[in-house]
Amino acid sequence: MSLVASACDAVDMVVPEDVGDGSIQMRACHDNGIELNGTRFNGTRFNGTWFNGIRLILAQLVEGTTKKSLTGWSLVPGTSELQAWSSAGELLRGDELVGARLHWLVDDGKQQQEVKVRIAGVTQSWDRPDIYFTDLDVRFGDGAWESLCTDGEGEPTEAIVVPGYFDAQTADWLPGEQGELAVACRGTAAGKCLEWGYRMWAKQGGISLADHYRACTRMVRADYCGNNVSHTENGTVIDVSDGLSPAILEPETDWPIEAKWGPHGAVCLNQPRKLSHSRAKVIAECKAAGRGSLPYCNQSEPGEHGGLLMSQALPS
């Protein structure tokens, strides 16, 4: 199975669009019910303030003049679908929560801030039914409501709510121990890897995909050293594959192998995908970050040196 992670708001649109601010809208067409073949476009965006973890303080479902308190927030096991209990004892899930108003305590790694959030819509992915896209609006103080997530053009887009949280310094996804939830916006590395199929809650061939997800977020951003430093540019094309059985993504080109990836970054490296970054310079950076040296990649399978994913690229 393969897909394009590019700008696909229109059904027949498969080419990424440079929006002039260093961002590219990169979105797979799962919600349109279309599966497209082709290599994948990477980018540099990962996460922002919202993604390190959120804690729910108060929640109500507003229905006309009726307000129901909502408690027991969690994800339906094995999915990214939200669920909660109402004060009337009802278990509400997915689009039954549209209209809910929430007060979140958000930790951006530096300070905590209380914000108001509302659920504006919930849509189930067509080809990955365990993924739910949640429209989340946010408001600070008495300001206007605005979308929590925006694409490269600044237009509203959906979020995927995930278990756990993202470490503020390393950008590593962690499962959490107290029912934490985090948000992955579509088009970022955090969201794109989920849509490609590497859902941290899922298994493939009996193998947990949590580490494949971590490896994918490193790979998309060319975070070779696993220190949250990107070495790529938006719109750079890479060919992605894994060694799973059955594979989620398989090679589509005969391009040179760039690197193989584990949860903490590259496990071997040839020429980085951007010629502005030499192999020697990246290896020096990794040594400075305590990763040690990176060997060359020689074999054509992702599993060399313990890799989980493999990226191929035409250096540019």
Image (cartoon, rainbow, N blue to C red):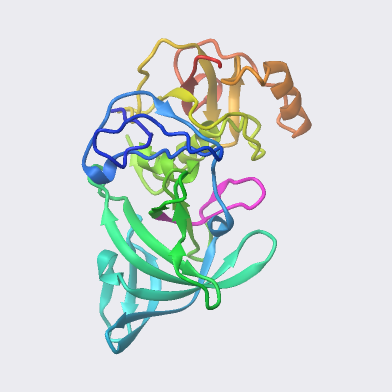
Residue 191 at least partly seen: yes
Residue 94: within the magenta? no
Q: In which quarter of the image is residue 45?
A: top right
Q: In which quarter of the image is residue 146?
A: bottom left
Q: For the view shown, which residue lies furthest in the right direction?
A: 288
Q: Position of residue 257 (x, y in %)?
A: 51, 15
Q: Nearer the viewer, residue 241 or 118?
A: 118
Is residue 34 left or right of 85 when viewed as pictured? left
Q: Nearer the viewer, residue 9 or 197?
A: 9
Is residue 229 left or right of 71 when viewed as pictured? right
Q: Which residue: 21% across, 42% down? A: 33
Q: Quadrant of residue 277?
A: top right
Q: Position of residue 128 (x, y in %)?
A: 27, 44
Quadrant containing the C terminus is top right
Q: Which residue: 54% across, 44% down? A: 46
Q: Which of 272 and 204 is in front in this view?
A: 272
Q: Position of residue 282 (x, y in %)?
A: 70, 23
- Against 155, residue 181 (above or below) is below
Residue 78 at least partly seen: no
- Against 236, residue 215 (above or below) is below
Q: For the view shown, which residue lies furthest in the front direction?
A: 20
Q: Which residue: 61% across, 13% down? A: 296
Is residue 122 left or right of 283 when viewed as pictured? left
Q: How many marks?
A: 0
Residue 164: within the magenta? yes
Q: Where is residue 195 in the image (x, y as percent from the top left)?
A: 36, 41
Residue range highlighted in magenta:
160-175
Quadrant containing the N terminus is top left
- Against 128, residue 310 (above or below) is above
